């Protein structure tokens, strides 16, 4: 079964505060598209060191969306990029797409 984004971690951090929960969601919704765009720009420019830095930032959003396997994938992809390898790109893009779809529907 494929992992699906959720708000469990955000709800846990918010500790029952709906206002704080909404603030966290708003931050993710605001930052995620820009971070994804920068990641793709660097990836397509073959600037793999910078791309690894982008993945490092994105993996925290992936973790916040409750994607444990996605987080592990991001860690592995970050390390792979540092070696100028990109075999995990398609799987990573699936993870980003699932988050993007989830955020649009929130």
Image (tube, grey):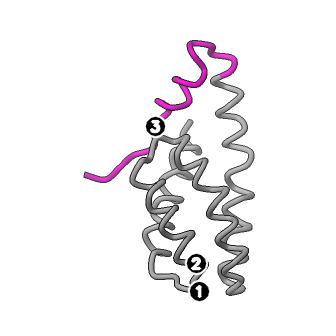
- Which residue sits at x=63%, y=13%? 17
For marks 1 and 2, give the CA distance.
5 Å
Q: In this picture, is 4 found above or below 13? A: below
Q: Which residue is mark 1?
A: 84
- Which residue sits at x=68%, y=65%? 54
**Dividing the image into 4 quarters, which one contains the C terminus?**
top right
Q: Residue 28, located in which quarter of the rendered image?
A: top right
For marks 3 and 2, give the CA distance.
27 Å
Q: Which residues are magenta?
A: 1-20
Q: In this picture, is 64 found above or below 74? A: above
- Relative placement, left or right, of 44 versus 103 is right
Determine crowd level at label 1: few under 14, some 14-19, many 20+ residues with C-alpha closer than 10 A: some
Is 25 covered by the magenta stretch?
Answer: no
Which badge, 3 or 2, comes first in the chain's sequence? Answer: 3
Q: Secondary structure at mark 2?
A: helix
Q: In this picture, is 47 found above or below 96? A: below
Percent position (x, y) of residue 78?
A: 57, 69
Marks 1 & 2, CB-CB < 8 Å contact: yes
- Which residue sits at x=51%, y=45%? 102
- Relative placement, left or right, of 16 versus 71 is right
Q: Which residue is mark 2?
A: 81
Q: Which residue is mark 3?
A: 6
Is 19 covered by the magenta stretch?
Answer: yes
Percent position (x, y) of residue 7?
A: 50, 32
Q: Residue 22, located in which quarter of the rendered image?
A: top right
Q: Residue furthest top?
A: 16
Percent position (x, y) of residue 90?
A: 45, 74
Marks 3 & 2, CB-CB < 8 Å contact: no
- Relative placement, left or right, of 15 versus 45 is left
Q: Secondary structure at mark 3?
A: loop
């Amino acid at each position: 079964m494929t992992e699906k984004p959720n708000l469990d971690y955000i709800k846990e951090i918010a500790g029952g505060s709906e206002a704080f929960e909404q603030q966290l969601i708003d931050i993710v919704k605001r930052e995620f598209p820009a971070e994804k765009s920068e990641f793709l720009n660097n990836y397509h420019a073959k600037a793999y060191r910078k791309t690894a830095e982008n993945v490092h930032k994105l993996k925290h959003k992936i973790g916040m969306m409750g994607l444990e396997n996605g987080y592990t994938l991001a860690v592995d992809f970050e390390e792979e990029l540092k070696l100028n390898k990109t075999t995990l790109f398609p799987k990573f893009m699936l993870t980003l797409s699932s988050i993007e779809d989830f955020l649009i529907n929130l």
